[in-house]
Image: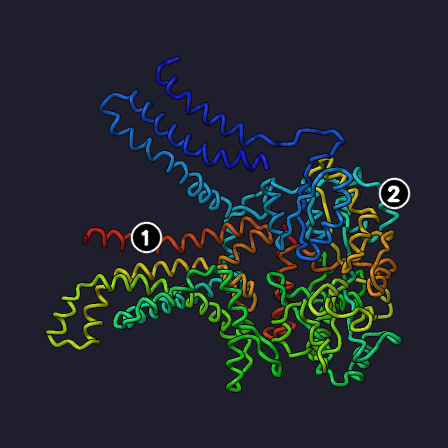
Amino acid sequence: MDSQLTTALEVVVGVPVILVAYIWGSERLVTLFPEKARRRVRPWLWIAPALAFLGFFLIYPTVQTIIRSFQSKSPLKPTWVGFANYKWFFTDSDALGALTNNVLWLLGLTIFTVGIGLLIAVLVDRVKYEAWAKSIIFLPLAISMVAAGVIWKFMYDYKPKGVPQTGTLNAVAGTVGVGPVGWLQSPTLRLSTFALIAIMVWMWTGFAMVIISAALKGIDPELLEAARVDGANEWQVFRKVTFPLLGPTIAVVSTTMIITSLKTFDIVYTLTSGNYDTNVIASLMIKEMFTFGDFGRASAVAVVLLLAIIPIMGFNIRQFRAQESVR
Amino acid sequence: MKKWMRGLVPLAVVTLAATACSSGGGSSSNSSDLHGKTVNVIGTWGGDEQKAFLQMVAPWEQQTGAKVKYTGTRDINTVLTTGVASGVLPDLAGLPGPGQMAEYAANGSLKPLDDVLDMNAYKSDTASALVNLGSTNGKVYGVFIKAAVKGLIWYNPKAHDYGQAPPKTFDDLMSQGKANQGQAKSLWCLGIESGAASGWPGTDWIEDLVLRTAGPDVYTSWYEGKTKWTDPAIKAAFDLYVNDVLANTYGGDKTAVATNFGNAGDPMFANPPGCEFLHQASFITTFSQFKSHQSGTDYNFFPFPDINPQYAGAVEGAGDLFGMFHDTPAAKSLMKYLVTAQAQDIWVKIGGALSANKGATDYPDDISKRSAAILANAKYFVFDASDSMPTAMNDAFWTAMVDLTNGSKTVDQVLTQLDSVQKDAYSS
């Protein structure tokens, strides 16, 4: 109890004290420099803590991971193995299966969340109960991934034919004389992967909808009015005016969804643990690292994931800059 | 002191104070008085098992005045792998299996127990197979804090009582089962879902079949990676599993992979029963409907029958290995206490667990007494093969059993796949 109290005191009192002391100390330090140099030194002193944190928590681990990806399994006595871990990643059937699934996730999740999100945003824009509809669709995003996994485990539950179905989907299918279907147990055509993607679509459509809806509200109604006056029908207004104006927003939402899909882990882990050909890169990484203790391979997987995300991040930043410069 | 340096003094004081605070509170006493000391224990037990463990250590806590801080986790592998790499380890911990125990002992993170335990008493009280499994390089590193007999065949005596004349051979079991099937929909109850470890009940099936068709020597060389998966001796066991078990399974393949192992026996208690037999270890009595039914009248078991008479009397067992990572006086004292018959009796009395200690006899019912007798009298005793394999092999074995049971892969496909994993997993 005592040590906990000390820790609490350290955090509550210590952190602000250190912060104030740093600011005060760095100002004192600046006064030592000649007047001219101060302007150049001060900003560096101010961002130094942030840079230190970034370096320690981001740059250092990244570099370490890259180095580790060229080393062998053992956590204690690593030896250099060259590109062996990468060779494994691009030849092992499990790893390639995980890669395939991630591509499916990327396409499925992005297309469905952005597509359905856009559709709903445009449709609810014209009804009175818009706020209600949007709240309900947005709600699943507030649920934690693992909780959503558990909820959908019940939805997809499978019981043998002739026994009351406790799973919602199979119960519904049963009333029309179909099934039961092993939603999560069907590696054929990677049906199980799509069953998992559906859960994430359910969760993230609300996110895409809210952002797109906000952009929609930002479009000047006079533009739409002008188009209509010029004789455009509703479809043409959407296709030629609304959609191009939503372009940058849709691009940002899409890249966010792509990154989300590449990071997918919780849903797969809670529902199938990667069985039935549903493994994804992130769960492969966790397995290599924490189950098999193969730090080399896990690092290689992490590096591949990082390399895959960098271009998308780059695109996102460029898009953001382009938008900023327009303003 | 220059002026600017004086300006920095308060900063230095604050920093020093903060570090001093955080480094306080360490233990530095080596007296035998354990009062107020804490032993950190990590294990895989949760729920009832955790309660049982805490009841078991309560007398020790009262005697010494020390405290046990127990954390239960389903991911013991993860916790220990990262712990060994980072050096942040509990005092005592459950170990996933003899394989990992040997690894941790070799790199020095696990401490030998020869000076901690009363070795003569330990060796005379414990089945020698279990003592050997807990030893590596001639020293004892792990003790079995509880044990289980694997491969018991559970049945519902109300449907048909096998108590008088239990099947002697596997063929006998299949034919008697079919003759007495009555209204039961199928022969076997099967459920292999178990989260990240899905598939392990299937691996237990294969292990029991290998042990009784090919014998303990092949069994050992198989988990040591010296016998290939495609070897005819191993393939025979897989074929037997597909033809005799999967073909007669309640609800078919999808039901088996979608059902949690703990609920697998539920259809056995239904009226009319869904299935006749459940192949599972002695610990199943603490799960699902076994808990709400009466042992002896509602459920009972007979040992897995022999297949090849040459290997009659072979038994597969498992258990929770326990090891010590820090040799503090309190940890040593707790370790010593845990293996005693006095401590073990508390646990076995609660039910669901067998003790590795022959002196523990407080079993609550006939069923656990009989399983304990099987454990103590086994002619050949082997440890769970999949748990003795390297983790990557074990994991691939689990996945293979899910694929095979689900019908998405054939025996040959999974065996070829397992062979390629075997080549990779043992070389490191």
Q: For the point 37% across and 67% down, which residue is it? A: A113
What's the residue at 23%, 54% (across, down)?
Answer: A323
**Residues flagged by tags 2 and 1 on a common chain:** no
The residue at 70%/74% (across/down) is B189
Q: Nearer the viewer, residue B29 or B121?
A: B29
Towards the viewer: B282 or A81: B282
State the residue position of label 2.
B120
Query: Residue A112 at what x, y percent from top left?
Result: 37, 69
Near mark 1 (Cα within 10 A), the count class, few <14, some 14-19 or many ≥20, is: few
Could one spot residue B220 in this view of the protein?
Answer: no
Front residue (pair A132, A139): A132
Q: How is the image coloured?
A: rainbow
A155 on left or right of B275: left
Q: State the image coordinates of residue B81 (x, y, percent, origin top left).
A: 61, 47
> Judging from the image, what secondary structure is the residue with disc 1 in?
helix
Q: Amino acid at mark 1?
A: Gly
Amino acid on which the number 2 mark rests in the picture: Asn
Quote the CA–CA distance across marks 2 and 1.
68 Å
Picture coordinates of residue B336, whole percent (x, y):
79, 42
- SS at mark 2 in the image: helix
Q: Residue B246: which quarter of the image?
A: bottom right
Chain of the residue displaying label 1: A
Q: Which residue is mark 1?
A: A314
